[in-house]
Each structure stands twice: as structure tokens, then as C-alpha cells.
Amino acid sequence: MSISKSDRRDFLRLAGVTLLSTVFSTRRAISVQGAKTNVLFIIADDLNRSLPAFGNSVVKSPNVDRLAERAIRFDRAYCQYPVCSPSRVSFLSGRRPEHTGMYANSGKSRTPLLENAVFMPQYFRQQGYFTARVGKVFHIGMDVPECWDVTEEGTPENKIIYQPQEPEKLGLADKIAANGRLDGDTGEGGGWMQLKVAEEQLIDDRTSRRIAELLDQGAKGDKPFFIACGFRRPHLPWMAPGNYFDAYDPAALSLPETGTVPRPAGDPKKPAASAESRRASLRAYFACISFMDRQLGRVLDTVDRHNLWENTIVVMIGDNGYHLGTRGGYWGKGTPYEESCGVPLLIAAPNCAGGTACRGVVEYVDFYLTLVNLCGLPPRSDLEGRSLQPLLDDPVAPWDHAAFSVTARNNAPWSLAVSTERYRYIEYADPRTPVELYDIQADPKEWTNLAANASHADALARLKKLAGEHRKAFWK
């Protein structure tokens, strides 16, 4: 007997509601008894796992480290789409990109498929929360106003200013002390600017100060809050004051290995960038992480000052990953590979064991259901993730779930990546394109395709089956 796509969707949603109801009825109480739990949701743009908390010993991010000491660190988290707007619209709606219809950084966040959707902050607002966002939460210029009591860009006069426009629009065009970009065929180009400015002149500093004010107000208010903080760094072009560049000696930076695989995009006949320009761009990316981290510190200082840790869930993410010269010398996102789809995720919640690592494979589409669950709000039946409550209660609890990430061409899904505890599998809409299978434990850079290796045939069949089930449920 065949099952229609609508029946499959109803089954998946019903299964999710049943699971949530079971977990909700038996869960350990994270929220403070007699009070609703606040949410502070922090997004850093294009932030990959180049952080000490995730094993990078070079980057200086003491405030991310400080948050990680209070948080569950998810080492195997994946975004649903490795590009800014599709990723954000997915986790803010609780629906996969195949059901949002958002496959690019253009168009309204409330797509035709989301005409009747209730976005995550919108739902919290409906449940009596004060909601606010400052900075890039939805994509710049693509906010959904009904989500918020307060919605601000973090810019002078609340103007829409895209990242490359900052020097000109902020009156800092004559403050560029040095600049450059990668000198080969690399992907997104790796452009950077070292600025001779005070950090309070930049948008992320404005954002952190305004978020601190809103947290001050929220701590004294009579309503629980959902506050979203959207930092622009480390998105291209990589811009920061000179002292953040000075923290990194480019000559001392080790260049990532490129492997023998081809670049995912570009002309393979053109050379990759020179070592000198790669080190300059790597330095700039790290400088922007450190600049973002300084702003995060101001936000966390405010949480400390009001002791909000006792009744506030703090989530910090990068919206997607980012290649820094790996995979044949590729710099950028938008690929189905680990460094593009794999993302940093920290969740600090009352009564959770801080400073703990979780190896369970989780997805960004899980956020909405998780926060609804943790805050004790009425469950929703239209969400496509699962609650991470069991892993917050016990980070090493059994968790046998896969993550699914897509990319698109011509406004339709093109690649599908399936991530499990040991393997990553990639297939394409065009069956003539070879499938890929990687043992992510033995080969974290995904350099050796095992799809034709007979000793991994069982794993290939298992992941192909997972991919097929996902496509039947979610692809048109």
C-alpha cells in the first residue's frame, strides 16, 4: 500500500508530538519552579568550530570559553542549509528548508510555504513573553516584525546596512589601515579590512550594548523574555580594529591541509591562493572571532550581574560552518561537507551540567521544539525537529538519530548530506553524480570516499536508506 506525502508528513508530526508529550510529562524540571524561563539566543554569522571550546588552540575567545564552562557543548551539531538565510529561516520556523522554500539569501523570510507559520520568537510572544532582537537574526533586511516587541538592526538610525557597506555607511571609509583578499581561485574570496577605529563605532559593539540594556530591563520586568542577539562577525568581509589583528602573528599560523580532493566550486585549473594571502585571511577571520567574542563578553557580564543563569536558557550558535582553505583550497560555505554543515552549538540551561561535551548528532531544526519544551510552553504539532531535552539531562544518553543538510540549485534541492555517529553520506539530485561516503571518525576531513569500498557496503546501504526516507518525506 502506498502512502501519500501528506500522510507521511502527518505521521511524522504526530510522532513528534507523541514523543514530546512523553518527554514533557517525564522530564526533569529545568525551568525555575513557579516562574517562566527566559531565553537568550545568540547567533554569530559564519562562525565555524574554530574555537578553543571545540579544539582550536590558536583562536582567542575567552568569553565563548566562559560560556562553554556553563553549557553543554554539542560537538556534532548540523545546520539544515549551510548558507545564512536558509539556515536561519529553518531553525526560526522549526521546519526544514524543503518545507520553508528558502534556498537563497534573497526574498522574504516568510516565504509562501510559511504564510501561516508561527516563528519561534513569535510563538514565545504569543505565550506572554517580551521578545526583542538586535542585529542579524533573520537575514539583514528580511526581519519578520510580528515576532518582536522590539526589533532593531543595531545600526545608526536603524538603517539597513549590509556587511560590505559598513565602512562607507558608518563614515569609516578613511579608517581602513590595511586590506586584502585571497589571490587565487578560492570560493568567496577571503576579503578583509584592518580598521583604525574605536570598536564602539562598529555595529557589533552597538548590538552588544543594546542587548545589555534589554537584559537589564528584562531582569527587572514582570514578563519572561526571549531576546535574540545577532552578531555580524565573522562574516565577510573580515573587518575589525587593528588590535584584534595584532593578537595573531600571520607567520605563526599553520595553514590547514587542503587534501587531494578538488575544490567544491571554481575552476580547478586555476591555482589556489598563495600561502601569504591565506595566512592574512586566516588571521583576519580569527581577528573577527576575537572581536565578536569581546562583544559577547559584554552580554555575558550582564547575565552575570543579574544572576540570570538561574532562570535563563542561553543558546549560542554559528548559523552555518565555513571552509578556511580546506578541500583543495576552498574558502566559503554552501557545500554539503562537514566544515560547511557542521556548526558550533552551546546550550546553558538551569540545572544542566555545565562544561560537558555531547557527541550526539543533533540538528538546528531541533531548537524550536527544545526551547518550547524547556520553557514549559504548550507543545506544537507543526515542528519538524525533536527535543534535545534528553541530552541536556544526560549528554551521554543513548541518541541514535541522523542529521540532514541540503543545498539547492535553481530553487530546488540539489545535494542531501546525512550525518550519523560514524559516517557522513552525500547524494545529489542528479543520479549521474557519484554518491560519497566518509568515515567521519577516521577521516574527519572527508578526503577518502568509501562509497565503492566493499567493507563499508552495509553502512552505505543504511545511509542510502535514511536518505531515501528523508527525500520521500520532505522532497517534492
Image (cartoon, rainbow, N blue to C red):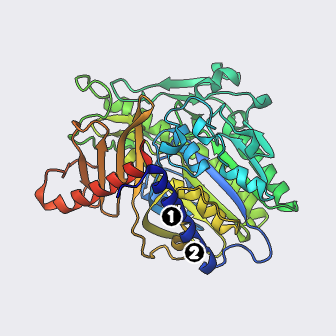
Which image quarter holds the N terminus? bottom left
- Residue visible at 24% across and 39% down? 431
**Horizontal and vertical percent for residue 272?**
29, 28
Indicate whether 60 appears above or below 357.
above
Q: In this orientation, which residue lies closer to the viewer: 256 or 426?
A: 426
Instruction: Left or right? Give the position of 164 relative to 52.
Output: right
Q: How many marks?
A: 2
In this view of the protein, which residue sits in the foreground, 409 or 2?
2
Is any part of residue 293 visible from this angle?
no
SS type, badge 1: strand
Q: Quadrant of the C terminus?
A: top left
Q: Left or right? Give the position of 74 relative to 307.
A: left
Secondary-structure class at tag 2: helix
Find disc 2 in the rendering and name its residue: 23
Q: CA distance from mark 2 to mark 1?
A: 21 Å
Residue at 61 percent of width and 48 percent of height: 92
Q: Is residue 442 above or below residue 269?
A: below
Nearer to us in this view, 280 or 331: 331
* 16 relative to 321, above or below: below
Q: Residue at x 42, y 29 (%)?
A: 188
Q: Position of residue 286 (x, y in %)?
A: 49, 43
Q: Amino acid at mark 2?
A: Val
The x and y percentages for residue 176 are 59, 23
Q: Residues within 10 Å of mark 1 (few under 14, many from 20)?
A: many
Residue 82 makes an appearance in the image: yes
Q: Quadrant of residue 197?
A: top right
Marks 2 & 1, CB-CB < 8 Å contact? no
Q: State which mark lies toward you, 2 or 1.
A: 2
Question: Mark 1 highlights which residue?
Answer: 73
On screen, residue 82 versus residue 127, left or right, reads left
